[in-house]
Image (cartoon, helix red, strand yellow):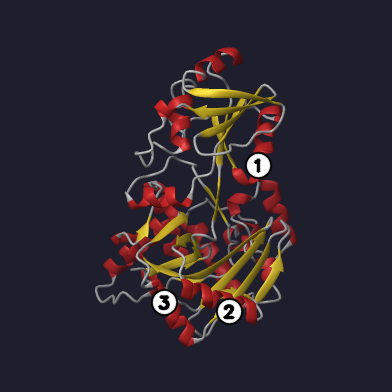
Amino acid sequence: MAKIIAFKGIRPAKDKVHLVASRSVDGYDKKELHEKLASNPYSFLHVISPDFKDGKRTKPGSTARLQKVKAQYIDFIKEDVFITDEKPSYYIYQQFKEGNAYTGVIGCSSIDDYFNGVIKIHEQTLTEREQKLKDYLEVCDFNAEPVLFSYPNDATIDEITAKTTLTTEPAYDFTTTDRVRHKLWVLSDPGEVKQIEERFEKIPAVYIADGHHRSASSALLGTSRREKNPNYTGKEPYNFYLGVFFPETQLKIFDFNRVVKDLNGMNAETFLERLQEKFIIEPKGETEYKPAKKHNFSMYLEGRWYSLDAKKEIIHNEEPVGSLDASILTEQILAPILNIHDLKTDKRIGFVSGIKGMKELKNQVDKWSFTVAFGLYPVEMEQLKHIADTNNIMPPKTTWVEPKMRSGLVIYSLSE
């Protein structure tokens, strides 16, 4: 059963939260990152990118760089940019984005649940990246970006979060420049804290929606520190890591689409002929087309849209991974026709998140260096769960899950 605990969060002072919380550093290009750092001394980006402060460049991932991250984080605490809650708390988080509303609970999950399978995964992690993140945690000693989890809806947890959000004032209520509204409540009442923990303990499994490498690296760190501490009790902070837990009906899974630079030496006519062997093709002209159901794809080629319906003989619904549209696209088009076999390394393929819509696929072909684009129908939650429950792994870039949380909104110390 899931062990998800309350903790004493480290979080921005109320008057600075809108300045502190940032997108993941990977979400900024070089110019935008510099502008953010230059214009906002409170941004959490100063912690993640500490070289800006003294102008002395350090190698990313080096011990020197990580020590500067930790020092900048401590400076933020000393300067009261961050405050520390006095009681173990859960944090109720709400996000409003483009007409969608999401409500979840921020808490800490157990590394033991990661090892014993209570935490379900659907993505293969890379050992090198796991180790890099583990080294980061070892030096910096905090989690600032929670892993995104889903769990089966629980009526009691829903009642507590609804009561909190509807009857009490949030600790934070701010809107970021991307027009996303964020709210946060601190839930520290001992009775409610105990009730939430006990309800999570009745939930047999939670599912990682986003953050597989962060989970794996936290488990590595916990294992390493346990080995160095023969008297560990299992209650030390490093036995847990930061997560935000959304009821599965609250999460929204978007499509993750593909763009390809060339047709592997074919012209458009020949390419369409090859596709007809496995797909029923319906021209849509210049009218933007979005897939309408599973096993239906959209394609944009030479200024025109097409609907591609997979023929029955290539659909294998009994296979958890093979029945995914991302797998069908790879196995029936990308690999045999376009000669793209490794989605992780091939430079001829790119990926476009579904939140950008079909118009971005058209844009990638019309204005950039891509020749053809494919739109996929979004993976359903039951598909994701089935793959995780059967210990299978999804192909790369299969799902884009919302909401995405900001870094530095609530921080978990791994040693205090």
Any part of residue 42 in sight: no
Disc 3 crowd, CA 10 A, few/some/many (<14, 14-19, 20+): some
In whole angstroms, how far apart are the C-alphas of marks 3 and 2?
17 Å
Placement of 114 over or under 163, stated as above or below: above
Say which residue appears at 56% left-offset and 69% top-offset. 73
> Which secondary structure lies at badge 2?
helix
Amino acid type at circle 1 is Gly
Residue furthest to the front in view is: 312
N-terminal label among 2 and 1: 2
In whole angstroms, how far apart are the C-alphas of marks 2 and 1?
35 Å
Question: Image check: 254 left or right of 284?
Answer: left
Marks 1/3 in contact by CB < 8 Å: the verdict is no
Any part of residue 130 in sight: yes
Residue at numbered disc 1: 357
Residue 292 in the image, given as x and y percentages of width and height:
58, 38
Amino acid type at circle 3 is Glu
Q: Quadrant of the N terminus?
A: bottom left
Disc 2 crowd, CA 10 A, few/some/many (<14, 14-19, 20+): few
Mark identifier at residue 163: 2
| Closer-to-camera residue (57/27) | 27
Residue at numbered disc 3: 197
